[in-house]
């Protein structure tokens, strides 16, 4: 239809990808413990539903914040209803900055005046693209990456994504040569590279970037004079070891207040850590005044509801609550991840060793008929329609190797997760290759465990890494 | 994009706000401060809404009565929006149009306020470099909302005081032809109805002609009906939705008709960011819905409003009270202004008047308009919006808002205008005037303000620069910031 814009007909929103198709199937036949026990279990949605009780408890103890009342009993309804200042509620930004600091062990500071609020990190990422790039420019992203980036970074901005190819050979870590290759590839395609965007902790891998990778990235953007965007939306879900933010590394390298630090931007959101995706709370943090200024104006297109800002500023200002929440959240996620890993193990399936996120990056390469994406798609369809689990195929995350799947574990009850693992085990045992593999994988895994120091020691450096074996 | 000026925030529209921020009026703490009359907000019915919220604690997912819904609502990020919310919005839109038309909840798409809705509709309907016609004077922020990130151009269809700024088909046709000759691809016409800044409504026959025009040219018609429920006259608001329902399918191609809406003006909730794109075109609905990911309405807010707008009795009462109070304000204001011989464009909607101060200009120029505007800010202590910031082609018109303050402040503002005009009448020297051809229908008196002690003229630019260096704010600081 020529009378509409090209954006209407283009596929750049990426919603025809399998990532979304699985959801559609789930919508048609959703699992419910009592009403639809044979339905599809949703394991494709990276939501954090583990700590609502803590939030509800806080709300019960703090009814004023929830009902438009100040602590002195005065109603703030009118002021909130009128408040559309795109600088955001100062108390909220202050509380958000402090929350971000707490998640990083108070090792770095965030200046509230450098925070720009946005309607979720979806909007934050798109806005940053509008600020740092023009149509036809490129941004480098390590694969595999969050499928929504195809829409958020490219669709309306006209910016291109060029992948930094990562492989299972080294646990999908970013290497110098992969960075250089991506940069040259962009050049070949006649695209001007404006920056690198990483998600740290990674979606879909569930791993945090090592210091080595962060140093590499900073050196790279320094030498190429480009930007680095670190989407740290999962920063509060690190359960295995300390989270090293790009801000930590900037501080350690004494690069704060330098030219380079102006090109480093952090994106955050409360959708994963607090489990509040419906409230649409996203943030951009930048040391570049011009970016802060432009992004602030652009936030007019997606401000955070004042009602929500007010509620959350009260909640996040309660330090006792935030401390308890962060710790408990991490604890529960760790337990859940263990349950996923052991459930998979029982089915002869391994996942990438992870220390963060709401999902596991699961290795099902041995279940493929052939080492192709067609085979991955066939396997995925079986898992959705026969095993009745909606999981996300690696190809939807632009993974270069077929057979990897992202499986979420924090958006359901313990019982549902156990059921999902049971179904998977039954399926694997029912297929021929599965029967053979699960026995030998199980033995292989048992011996592996004896070798490693602990289950959840995260990779310290590239040389310590045990390469995955088929 | 980060460095260009296309966000339009260096216009005078925002300068007045900055001056207000430095010296805001308060009845007790700062009675000589500047009264904000540049902000089109509706603050007249908060008491009704506050009462409803108090009486309906279950509508808040955080209050004990509603908390059992908390987790479901908190995780809800489906860009289709809460079904109850869409249904309530569709019902409200119908009620605001006197139930003369029914809206389909499945065509209701969320956005980040009407700001987000207008940008989104541009992204859906036009490619960079293409253009939309819009009648001028128009809402100053359209320059940002329609153009900045979309790359779409605005071509104004200038309206003139000679016919009370009425939009004519001939005017639209002429602008369209001009664009065509300059090889600019026009994708549609976008207008605000009721108009900002004029406060006037389009009548049915004009709307029908516009619908026929766009259908004939196969271009789009976007009606921003954000002020739909601010009509305070006997004449009813005619929505484009009502018009197309009554037209034959041969005259109207529904795929070209789109409505933008918001709760920011009718209900006075700009802080809650409730914008709506309503299109009769399925592809546009689908695309806008995907784009709504960039500006969904907070589920907490959706939940509250789904309940509030579903309360028929409350809504009907709110709508009728709203009109009554707005009508009263408008009447008192225009009558008060008449007493000092200031007239406004006859209007029957909106939260403002389009004030005719041409007779107070030194000469018929925009420089004089700015000089007068500075006087109004510095001497009369009112922030109003000069017509030039709305791209008006004739100097001397000002948009003055009257619904964003309480009664006491409103009367102070009116008195200040009356006092100032009466005091300076004696000092005014009549001067023979060059009457602008276009405004010759009235006898416009132009007076010279020689006697007035002004620290003004272009040295005011220094004052402006100092303001510009402080953090810019889109809207006045809410009292919350001072708490």
Image (cartoon, rainbow, N blue to C red):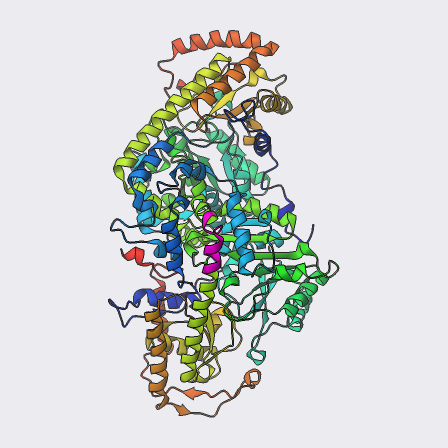
* Residue furthest out toward the front: B313
Q: Residue B390 vs residue A464: left or right?
A: right
Q: Quadrant of residue A322?
A: top left
Q: Residue B45 vs residue B25: left or right?
A: right
Residue B164, placed above or below residue B230: below
Which residue: 64% across, 66% down? Answer: B207
Q: Which residues are magenta?
A: B307-317
As for residue B391 lying within the magenta part, the answer is no
Q: From the viewer's side, name the closer residue of B413 and A352.
A: B413
Q: Quadrant of residue B175?
A: bottom right
As for residue B314 lying within the magenta part, the answer is yes
Figure disc tally: 0
Q: Residue A159 vs residue A221: left or right?
A: right
* Residue furthest out toward the right: B250
Q: Residue B366: x percent and y percent?
A: 47, 77
Residue A366, placed above or below residue B90: above
Residue A455, placed above or below residue B405: above
Q: From the viewer's side, name the closer residue of A101 and B112.
A: B112
Q: Residue A65: x percent and y percent?
A: 31, 46
Considering the whole magenta stretch, tell me its main secondary structure.
helix
Residue B107, placed above or below residue A362: below
Q: Residue A180: x percent and y percent?
A: 50, 34
Q: Is there any visible trace of residue A459 in the rendered image? A: no
Q: Is there any visible trace of residue B462 in the rendered image? A: yes
Q: Residue A239: x percent and y percent?
A: 36, 26
Which residue: 64% across, 47% down? Answer: B283
């Amino acid at each position: 239809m020529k009378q509409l814009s090209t954006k209407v007909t283009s596929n750049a929103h990426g919603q025809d990808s399998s990532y979304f198709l699985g959801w559609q199937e789930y919508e048609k036949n959703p699992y419910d413990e009592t009403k639809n026990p044979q339905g599809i279990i949703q394991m494709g949605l990276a939501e954090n539903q583990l700590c609502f009780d803590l939030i509800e408890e806080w709300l019960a103890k703090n009814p004023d914040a929830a009902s438009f009342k100040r602590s002195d009993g005065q109603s703030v309804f009118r002021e909130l209803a009128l408040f559309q200042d795109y600088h955001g509620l100062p108390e909220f930004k202050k509380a958000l900055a402090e929350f971000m600091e707490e998640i990083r062990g108070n090792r770095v500071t965030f200046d509230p005046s450098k925070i720009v609020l946005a309607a979720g990190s979806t909007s934050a990422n798109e806005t940053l693209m509008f600020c740092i790039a023009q149509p036809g420019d490129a941004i480098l992203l390590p694969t595999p990456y969050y499928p929504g980036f195809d829409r958020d970074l490219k669709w309306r901005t006209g910016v291109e994504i060029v992948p930094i190819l990562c492989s299972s050979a080294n646990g999908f870590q970013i290497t110098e040569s992969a960075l250089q290759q991506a940069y040259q590839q962009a050049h070949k395609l006649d695209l001007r590279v404006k920056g690198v965007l990483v998600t740290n902790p990674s979606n879909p891998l569930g791993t945090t970037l090592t210091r080595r990778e962060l140093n590499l990235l900073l050196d790279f953007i320094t030498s190429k004079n480009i930007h680095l965007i670190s989407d740290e939306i999962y920063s509060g879900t690190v359960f295995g070891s300390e989270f090293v933010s790009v801000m930590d590394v900037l501080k350690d390298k004494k690069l704060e207040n330098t030219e380079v630090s102006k090109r480093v931007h952090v994106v955050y959101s409360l959708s994963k850590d607090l489990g509040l995706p419906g409230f649409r709370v996203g943030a951009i943090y930048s040391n570049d005044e011009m970016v802060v200024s432009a992004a602030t104006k652009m936030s007019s297109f997606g401000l955070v509801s004042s009602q929500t800002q007010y509620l959350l500023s009260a909640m996040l200002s309660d330090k006792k609550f935030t401390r308890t929440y962060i710790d408990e959240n991490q604890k529960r996620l760790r337990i859940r991840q263990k349950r996923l890993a052991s459930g998979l193990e029982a089915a002869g399936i391994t996942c990438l060793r992870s220390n963060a996120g709401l999902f596991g990056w699961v290795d099902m390469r041995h279940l493929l008929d052939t080492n192709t994406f067609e085979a991955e798609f066939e396997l995925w369809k079986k898992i959705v329609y026969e095993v009745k689990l909606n999981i996300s195929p690696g190809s939807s995350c632009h993974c270069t190797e077929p057979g990897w799947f992202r499986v979420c574990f924090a958006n359901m009850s313990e019982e549902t997760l156990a059921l999902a693992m049971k179904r998977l085990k039954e399926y694997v045992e029912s297929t021929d290759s599965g029967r053979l593999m699960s026995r030998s994988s199980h033995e292989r895994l048992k011996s592996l465990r004896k070798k490693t120091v602990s289950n959840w020691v995260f990779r310290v450096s590239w040389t310590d890494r045990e390469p995955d074996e088929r | 994009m980060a460095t260009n000026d296309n966000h339009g925030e260096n216009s005078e529209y925002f300068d007045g706000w900055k001056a207000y921020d430095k010296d805001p009026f308060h009845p007790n703490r700062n009675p000589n401060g500047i009264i904000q009359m540049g902000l089109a907000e509706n603050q007249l019915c908060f008491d009704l809404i506050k009462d409803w919220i108090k009486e309906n604690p279950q509508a808040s997912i955080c209050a004990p009565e509603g908390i059992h819904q908390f987790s479901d609502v908190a995780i809800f990020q489906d860009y289709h929006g809460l079904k109850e919310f869409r249904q309530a919005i569709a019902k409200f839109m119908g009620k605001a149009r006197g139930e003369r038309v029914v809206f389909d909840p499945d065509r209701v798409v969320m956005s980040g306020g009407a700001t987000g809705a207008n940008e989104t509709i541009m992204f859906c309907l036009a490619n960079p470099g293409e253009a939309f016609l819009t009648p001028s004077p128009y809402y100053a922020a359209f320059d940002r909302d329609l153009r900045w990130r979309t790359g779409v151009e605005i071509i104004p269809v200038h309206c003139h005081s000679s016919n009370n700024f009425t939009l004519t088909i001939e005017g639209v046709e002429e602008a369209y032809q001009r664009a065509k000759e300059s090889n600019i691809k026009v994708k549609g016409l976008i207008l605000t109805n009721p108009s900002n800044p004029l406060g006037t409504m389009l009548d049915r026959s004009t709307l029908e002609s516009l619908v026929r025009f766009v259908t004939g040219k196969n271009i789009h018609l976007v009606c921003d009906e954000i002020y739909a429920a601010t009509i305070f006259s006997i004449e009813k608001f005619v929505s484009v939705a009502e018009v197309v329902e009554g037209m034959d399918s041969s005259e109207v191609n529904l795929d070209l008709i789109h409505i933008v809406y918001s709760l920011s003006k009718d209900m006075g909730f700009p802080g809650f960011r409730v914008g709506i794109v309503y299109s009769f075109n399925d592809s546009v609905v689908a695309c806008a819905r995907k784009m709504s990911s960039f500006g969904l309405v907070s589920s907490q807010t959706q939940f509250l409003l789904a309940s509030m707008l579903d309360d028929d009795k409350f809504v009907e009462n709110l709508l009728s009270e709203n009109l009554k109070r707005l009508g009263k304000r408008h009447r008192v204001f225009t009558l008060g202004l008449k007493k000092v011989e200031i007239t406004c464009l006859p209007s029957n909607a909106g939260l403002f008047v389009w004030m005719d101060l041409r007779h107070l200009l030194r000469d018929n120029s925009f420089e004089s308009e700015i000089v007068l505007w500075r006087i109004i800010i510095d001497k009369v202590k009112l922030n109003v919006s000069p017509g030039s910031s709305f791209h008006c082609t004739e100097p001397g018109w000002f948009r003055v808002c009257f619904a964003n303050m309480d009664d006491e402040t409103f009367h102070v503002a009116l008195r200040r205008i009356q006092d100032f005009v009466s005091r300076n009448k004696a000092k005014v020297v009549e001067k023979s005037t060059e009457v602008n051809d276009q405004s010759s229908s009235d006898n416009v008196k132009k007076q010279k303000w020689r006697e007035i002690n002004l620290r003004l003229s272009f040295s005011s630019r220094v004052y402006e620069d100092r303001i510009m260096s402080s953090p810019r704010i889109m809207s006045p600081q809410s009292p919350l910031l001072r708490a």
